Amino acid sequence: MIAAALLALGLSIGAVVVVAVAVIWLVRNVKQRKADARSEIERDVLRGRPAKRLDERAQFFGLQSKGATQMRGLGTLALTEEELAFVLWMPHQTIRIPLRDIVVVDEAKSHLGKTVFTPLLRVRWRTAGMEETVAWRVADLAGWTADLAGAKARQPHV
């Protein structure tokens, strides 16, 4: 009886250790992905210039063309004088939207059937002969919307 109890205790402790190691690995991996996304934004998008706006915890709701089953997640969203860029942390994905190609910037209650019961930043743009739409939950939605509208207005008309 004591041996069975000790075995159960040992298995329980082992399970807790495995879960703890997995959580530590996941947290470190997410932190690294966030740092990698920030580095990519700084290297490939900002190139030494200041961002007009930056959100390092933008929640991605997906691309319209990929449908409702794609992965959502956190990433880094940056606005420059020429483009809106986003790097999804996991799985790694980069979206770059030239401001001159943006058709509409507005707010949405949901995107691709998903909601967090707070308004989302929604952007529709022209790309490769079609229109694409994406949405994010961002801090300071009103600021993002105003800054995107202002930056878009300063773009040369194509």
Image (spheres, grey):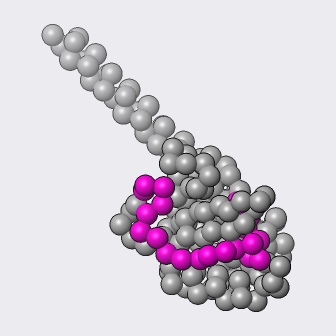
44 or 143: which is nearer to us? 143
**Would residue 38 be seen by someone viewing this image from the given angle?**
no
Instruction: Using the image, determine if residue 43 lies above or below residue 4.
Output: below
* Residue at the (50%, 79%) spot, across then down: 141
* Residue at the (48%, 37%) spot, across then down: 21
**Would residue 64 be seen by someone viewing this image from the given angle?**
yes
Residue 91, x across and y down, in percent:
62, 46
* Residue at the (20%, 17%) spot, across then down: 5
Residue 116, x across and y down, in percent:
39, 63
**Image quarter of the N terminus:** top left
Residue 124, x across and y down, in percent:
63, 68
Q: What is the quadrant of residue 132 in the picture?
A: bottom right
**Image quarter of the C terminus:** bottom right
Q: Is residue 156 magenta?
A: no
Residue 139, x across and y down, in percent:
50, 75
* Residue at the (58%, 87%) spot, across then down: 146
The segment highlighted magenta reads 95-114
Instruction: Using the image, determine if residue 97 lies above or below residue 27.
Output: below
Going by the picture, which residue comes out furthest to the front? 129
Taking the image as shown, residue 47 lies to the left or right of residue 4, namely right
Taking the image as shown, residue 111 lies to the left or right of residue 151, namely left
Taking the image as shown, residue 109 lies to the left or right of residue 101, namely left
Q: Is residue 96 magenta?
A: yes
14 or 48: which is nearer to us? 48
Q: How many numbered discs, if any?
A: 0
6 or 47: which is nearer to us? 47
